[in-house]
Image (cartoon, rainbow, N blue to C red):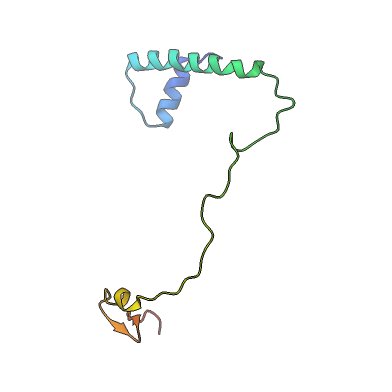
Amino acid sequence: MSVSKKDVEHVAKLARLGLTEEEKELFTTQLSSILDYAKNLNKLDTKNVPPTSHAIPMKNVLREDQVIPCTNTQDIVANGPEIEDNMFKVPRIME
């Protein structure tokens, strides 16, 4: 597939890029080369390749939640500006 200078100008306009004439020529050549190279993928037989969303198997890397007792509540609430009944006191926002 060949990319024209007009295509590059259109994409540059959409991206709000100001390109010089040399840049337009350079990007026209580079984009054409990239698309020509990507055409090689059409030569591959993918009939027996299942569609995937990731190239490698994904798994949840997070640990399971664990309930543990909090023993240092005094240290935690000591950082608050106002404390009431071992909790942070905040201004009322609803009436």
* Residue 7 horizontal/vertical position (percent): 48, 20
Please identify the quarter of the rendering in which residue 73 is found.
bottom left
* Residue drawn at point x = 58 percent, y = 36 percent: 56
Please identify the quarter of the rendering in which residue 70 is found.
bottom left
In the figure, is residue 27 to the left or right of 2?
Answer: left
* Residue drawn at point x = 43 percent, y = 31 percent: 14
Closer to us: 17 or 69: 69
In the figure, is residue 94 to the left or right of 1?
Answer: left
Residue 83 position (above or below residue 17): below
* Residue 72 horizontal/vertical position (percent): 35, 75
Residue that protrudes farthest toward the right in the picture: 48
* Residue 38 horizontal/vertical position (percent): 56, 18
Task: Assign the N terminus to one quadrant of the image.
Answer: top right
Residue 88 position (above or below residue 20): below
In the figure, is residue 79 to the left or right of 51?
Answer: left
Please identify the quarter of the rendering in which residue 27 is found.
top left
Task: Assign the C terminus to one quadrant of the image.
Answer: bottom left
* Residue drawn at point x = 44 percent, y = 20 percent: 8
Residue 49 position (above or below residue 41): below
Q: What is the number of callouts on the image?
A: 0
* Residue 34 horizontal/vertical position (percent): 49, 17
* Residue drawn at point x = 31 percent, y = 79 percent: 74
Closer to us: 81 or 39: 81
